[in-house]
Amino acid sequence: MYKYFLILFTFFFLKISLFSQTNYPQNYFAAPINNTLSLVGNFGEIRPNHFHAGFDLRTNGQEGMPVNAVADGYISRIKIGPEGYGKALYVTHPNGYTSVYGHLQGFTKEIAAFAKKLQYAKETFEIDTVLSADLLPIKKGQQIALSGNTGSSSGPHLHFEIRNTKSEMPVNLYCFGYKIPDNTAPRIIELAIIPIGSNATVNGKHAIKKIKPVHSKDKYSINTTDSIIANGEIGFGIDCYDTESGSTNHGVYSIELQAGGKRIYYHQLETFSFENSRYVNAHIVYSEKEKHNEILQKCYVSKNDKLEIYKDVVNGGIVNFKDDSTHWLKYIVKDFVGNSSEVYLKVKSTSKGNLNENKADSQTTFFDCLKENNFENDEVKMKLSTAILYDDIKFIYSKTLDVKAPYAPLHHIHTSETALQKDINLGIKAIKLPDSLQKKACIVSISRKGKIEYEGGTYKDGWVNTNTKHFGNFTIGIDNSAPRISLNNKMPDKNNIDLSKAKTIGVTATDELSGIKKYRATIDGKWVLCEYEPKKDLLFYTFDTNIKSGEHTFRIEVSDDKNNTSTLSFKFKR
């Protein structure tokens, strides 16, 4: 059995090498943790606005597991911040690759001292510094950190990835010989048949048709009641996932679509560029994600999709049904080691279209996704630079009055079901905005569920302008409320605060709209390092030997993005 698995793995790896023409080093990199590798997230997994760039490794549900360098090299970058990877280390290796370790609780003594010195020199918690090879050399297997839950992590784990040092493109860790027990084929949840052309139909309608395949004895089939009659240009999609032995649901490695026995679409997740990672929104049927939180991967390529993962795509993966015959489509979904799931889909083509094209009304404007697009009237103006959209759209605008938004109507800027690759510039005309509130004015968006989100913006010459990465419902809001801050340490007597045995000073900090933007903490007038943990609304200082016994004064000033500021000051004993 082991010999069979080894042959299968070697064969599949050779197929990957043929695709990429890259021979990745095998058995060069060690495991980053002293634990059986188990995944809570794999490479290429579809996340909000990006592909996942590495493995998320289990750490027994706890923080503090030793994290080791996977090969000789040097610490080439230290990045610390409240979001993203939180506390992260980058180790550059002599073979042309760089390993990355994210969401760390902390670093080992020498690295931590180096980072802290830099933070105090710059008087900031957030740092992103590049180091030369002579400063912090590292040996293979040397402990460099402790696993944690910092940044945008949703639970304790280690984020681990390997990048090409020169291109900075992350590479699927399986390519380097990392093995996770896996004898389970990917699961196919749903198929989607999607009209693309303006007059294309599926079962007589210009709407997505979804089918849930029947799964029995490790095989997939389509229920005979799920008949498909198609006319015009049709795209296909699939909702699927993979799971390694003992792991949770993850993204699949490759998806192939065949028509008439010939490949018309293929992608595999071996590598991608961070620059293009947001094109994941072009790779999925974004409207279904917005409406139903479903991840339908397209088996066709949008007009403006620059991902590097596609191969053998014929006519963009779109099939034009214009005859009166039966066509067979075949989906093939694989994980890295070659476990495969397949399903056939029968499509009855018809040459007779029966859909009348809807005429655009006066508020509809055609936007070419490869060109610059603008929209403007007396109350709103919007500019989209070239290649912000993924596909051409019929842009729609309307407005409604809202008593909860007294300084501008609620502007309906197209629909949130259409994704954007880059920022658009949006301006809204202010109505009867008092001079006293102009510096506090901003643009806010309101979701279909009524949630208000801060979009930023500044007031100038009667307009509030900002940049945003999404369409939706927008109006002018006011943020003149300062952040709320309070001492997190539980003290029975607020006038006699004894922190002689405390390890930290914790401050709870929240803001209603624009969010915590900056803060500054001092003890006895000298800046001290305060870390920010947004998930817990917590700012905290960790005591060190610089604070001697006696009475001291702690002061912290916290501001939001509209420069509303709150201050907390108190005396404590040490």
Image: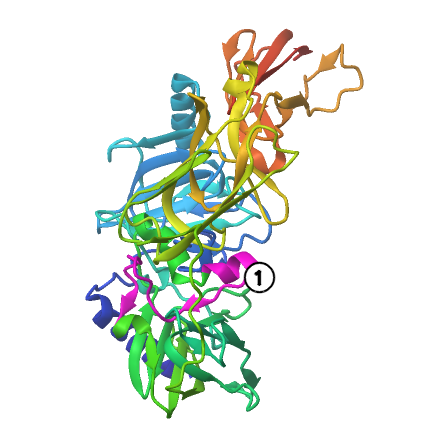
Q: Quadrant of the C terminus?
A: top right
Say which residue appears at 38% left-offset and 58% top-offset. 282
Q: Is residue 364 left or right of residue 532?
A: left
Number of dots carrying numbers: 1
Within-10-Å neighbours for mark 1: few <14, some 14–19, many 20+: few
Residue carrying label 1: 292
Q: Is residue 288 a member of the stretch shown in magenta?
A: yes
The image shows residue 288 at horizontal and vertical percentages of 51, 62
The amino acid type, in three-letter code, at marker 1 is His
Placement of 213 over or under 435, stated as above or below: below
The image shows residue 430 at horizontal and vertical percentages of 51, 27
Q: Is residue 260 left or right of residue 341?
A: left
The image shows residue 205 at horizontal and vertical percentages of 49, 75
Say which residue appears at 44% left-offset and 85% top-offset. 345
Looking at this view, is 376 or 209 the one in front?
376
Q: Is residue 207 left or right of residue 550?
A: left
Residue 297 quadrant? bottom left
Q: Is residue 543 a member of the stretch shown in magenta?
A: no
Placement of 460 over or under 215, stated as above or below: above
Task: Report the residue that reaches farthest toward the left.
Answer: 21
Point out the stretch of residues depicted in magenta.
286-311
Q: Quadrant of the N terminus?
A: bottom left
